[in-house]
Image: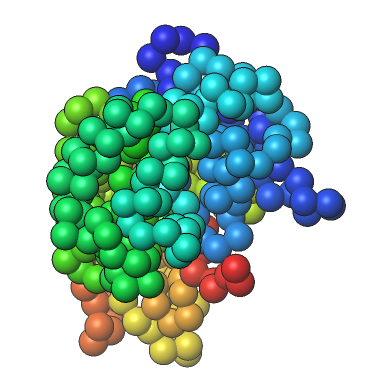
Amino acid sequence: MSLDTAIETKHIVKKYNEFVAVNGVDLKVTKGECFGLLGPNGAGKSSLMKMMYCHSVITEGELFVLGLNAKKNFREIKSKIGVVPQDNLLDSDFNAIDNLRLFAKYQQIDDYTAAETIRSLLKLLKLEDFANSEIETLSGGTQRRLAIARALINSPEIIFLDEPTTGLDPQSRLWLWNFIKQVKEMNGTIFLTTHYIEEAEELCDRVAIMDRGKILCVDQPRILIKQHIGDEIVEFFSNPVDLNYYLNRLKEFNYEYQVYNNMVLVFLKSGQDSKRIFDIIKSEKVTVRKPSLNDVFLKLAGYNLRDE
């Protein structure tokens, strides 16, 4: 494992009885990057992340975090990382500041250092006015900031964020995006899962798309878009009677496409002209647009809804 590697998995597997949630994943995360893990419900994202922050036992394979073997050195790993789980898991028996004090004791931070750190975190995350508030009185966005403060209390080298902005209002989501960017500027390593494709595109240096326990692709968002989609997308609707005719014409000219119900997405690579498609297609609803990471996600993971 190289010195600049923050996390490395080697054919890692997680099974729950006979169900394989993570199926032979090989992955490397570099120190100082924001790495995003995308995938539909049930893809195995949370199962993979929980093994990384030593909350879940590895079934097979090897996992190294900051050069430490997760099977042997899980206590030391936990002292070097911060975790913001999907559910904030704040203790409602304690107020906001006491939640932080309790976690500082768990991390074996002395009282003086803990008091100074908590004071700084309350200011950094704009929680000073809520220090003595009961957890149930705090908004979702404020609780999320408190969970992040808890994760930062031991000055972690890696921060794990599981669906960090789920359920937040737009203002809270924007604040959290800016905060993640600040952490990146300080060369902090971030590993996050998200359902919001635009979030990954905005924040992440690299992303992996995961489905059915396997990693489908890993790279920078712009490279994935170029590799899997191309330069443009022509999107059109067709009635069922004409659909097969249009698809056969697209095949004649070697256009790559994807069909969802009666909507057809044609992926244009370098050198392919959208004007030819307009000559082929006779539809009142034809648009040309730039591709996004969302198109990569849907192309690889599909359009079908998944159960949790």
What residue is at 68 percent from the left and 25 percent from the top? 71
Residue extending furthest right?
18
Q: Is residue 127 above or below residue 56?
A: below
Q: What residue is drawn where x is 67% and y is 20%? A: 72
- Above or below, 9 relative to 67: below
How many discs mark residues in the rendered view?
A: 0
Dividing the picture into quadrants, the one containing residue 274 is bottom left
Q: Where is residue 196? Give x, y as percent.
A: 35, 60
Residue 280: x and y in percent read: 30, 72
Which residue is at the front of the view, 134 or 12?
134
Position of residue 88 in the picture relative to residue 69 (left or right) = left
The residue closer to the viewer here, 301 or 42, is 42
Is residue 107 among what the camera can see? yes
Query: What residue is at 20 percent from the left and 68 percent from the top?
Result: 170
Q: Is residue 253 visible?
A: no
Furthest-front residue in view?
A: 111
Left-right relation of 115 to 98: left
> In the figure, 199 relative to 72: above or below?
below
Q: Could you tell me residue 162's position as x and y percent?
A: 44, 51
Q: Position of residue 262 (x, y in %)?
A: 43, 82
Quadrant housing the C terminus? bottom right
Q: How is the image coloured?
A: rainbow
Above or below, 13 relative to 244: above
Residue 270 falls left or right of residue 154:
left
Q: Quadrant of residue 219?
A: top left
In this picture, residue 89 sits left or right of residue 143: right
Q: Who's the residue at 41% across and 37% down the image?
A: 104
